[in-house]
Amino acid sequence: MLSAAENEVLTRVGRGTPMGELMRRYWQPVAAVAQLDERPTLPVRLMGEDLVLYKDARGGYGLLDRHCPHRRADLSYGVPEDRGIRCHYHGWLFDAAGACLQQPFEEIARPEARFRDKIRTTAYPVQAKAGLLWAYLGPAPAPLVPDWELFDERGYKQIVLAEIPCNWFQGQENSIDPIHFEWLHSNWSAALRGEPGARAPRHLKIAFEEFEWGFVYRRVREDTTEDDELWTVGRVCLWPNCLFTGKFEWRVPIDDERTLHVAWFNDPVPGEAPFAQARIPYWRGPITDSATGRLFTSHIMNQDFVAWIGQGAIADRTKEHLGESDRGVILLRKRMLEEAAVAAKGGDPKAVIRDPSKNVALPLPRVRTGRGAPVAPPGRPRPMLFHAGQPREIAEEMERIWAERSSG
């Protein structure tokens, strides 16, 4: 159980808050590259800040205060040009660094005043990597975007975006909670299928270990031993706000009560021939069934969302009663508070990367064999079990690719 003050520290992400300042020390995935290919401006809310993400006419990216500093027009309706984005209201032009480059009428009325030189807007750096656009809202100099090994592995990649109406930390606590899989994703799934008496193998033993990039959690169930990779390798709670299980699931704070869930998949394609995608497709994963008004419960991530949302917009941790299954959650909370203190003193918190020579195909522990390993039917792609709403065209494209490469 936490005190109300500790709960406030862990959950508030606005600028100047302990957790908000910690999270601003890391690059956050905020959109898919393909989104800006379709439309070059996108309104973004990130850690309580209203921003506009844009792609300029030269292919560069910028992230600015959403409201023009002239008279607060919404720059998500602005016009990207070669050097930045132009406000649609009075034509002021801003570059990706936040400098005002042009003020058309001011330069006619009083060119000698150079009023534009006195105007700047909030601006943050953006980088494209692995089909995602990453934003950094912290102090300069910015660290490096992590180059995870899976990003460049051969395979069919796709990105799923979903907005979850609850605090991001509820999702991240789920990332270090192995027992929930037995109940939420197994026993409850059986009940939803009309098999209420069915029971998954019970967990017999769990362990947690901190490493450079987060935490590994390990498990032994009734159907496994300590020789299985679920114990010898384990799963990764990736610091500070991600789960890695052979796929990535980032829990990106929109604000204190909303989370952008970013799931990134890479399914190995059959054969040995080179394979590359012209672009990584993205889709928006629904969380609510329009026919019933209820949350989807059919897919693994959607089941997680049901649990997180059910805890409230911001979970009241003063009313909890934690047990042995919650040792990982307790560890995560403790380390988050400690690293927030490091950031508050001006230090680099855990897992910040600055050395380019060390940021090359970074490996993470991954279960590859036995229980918990990815399973796909022979000659066909693994079905989308994780998120409701996969577009038919993506499923059909994967089927076509697998069929072509399995027959060769």
Image: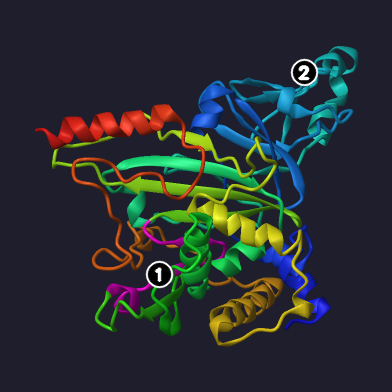
Say what amino acid the circle numbered 1 marks: Arg
Q: Among all residues in the image, which is located at the extreme left?
A: 408
Would residue 76 be visible to someone looking at this image? yes
Which residue appears at 77% of the width and 38% of the height?
121
Which residue appears at 67% of the width and 73% of the height?
340
- Sequence-wise, the earlier of marks 1 and 2 is 2
Front residue of 324/265: it is: 324
* Mark 1 or 2, closer to the camera: 1
Mark 1, Cα crowd under 10 Å, few <14 / some 14-19 / many 20+, is many
Asked if the magenta segment contains residue 197, the reply would be no
Residue interval drawn in magenta: 229-246
Answer above or below: position of 405 versus 331.
above
Percent from the top left, x then y, of residue 336? 63, 74
Q: Tag 1, which secondary structure?
A: strand
Q: Quadrant of the C terminus?
A: top left
Mark 2, Cα crowd under 10 Å, few <14 / some 14-19 / many 20+, is some
Could you say which disc has been placed on residue 290 in the image?
none
Mark 1 to mark 2 CA distance (whole Å): 48 Å
Marks 1,2: beta carbons within 8 A: no
Say what amino acid the circle numbered 2 marks: His
Front residue of 319/358: it is: 319
Q: Where is residue 269, by image quadrant?
A: top left
Which residue appears at 80% of the width and 82% of the height?
3
Answer above or below: position of 7 versus 121.
below
Percent from the top left, x then y, of residue 356? 40, 58
- The residue carrying mark 2 is 88
- The residue carrying mark 1 is 235
Q: Tag 2, which secondary structure?
A: loop
Q: Where is residue 380, by image quadrant?
A: top left
Percent from the top left, x then y, of residue 311? 71, 64
Asked if the magenta segment contains residue 232, the reply would be yes
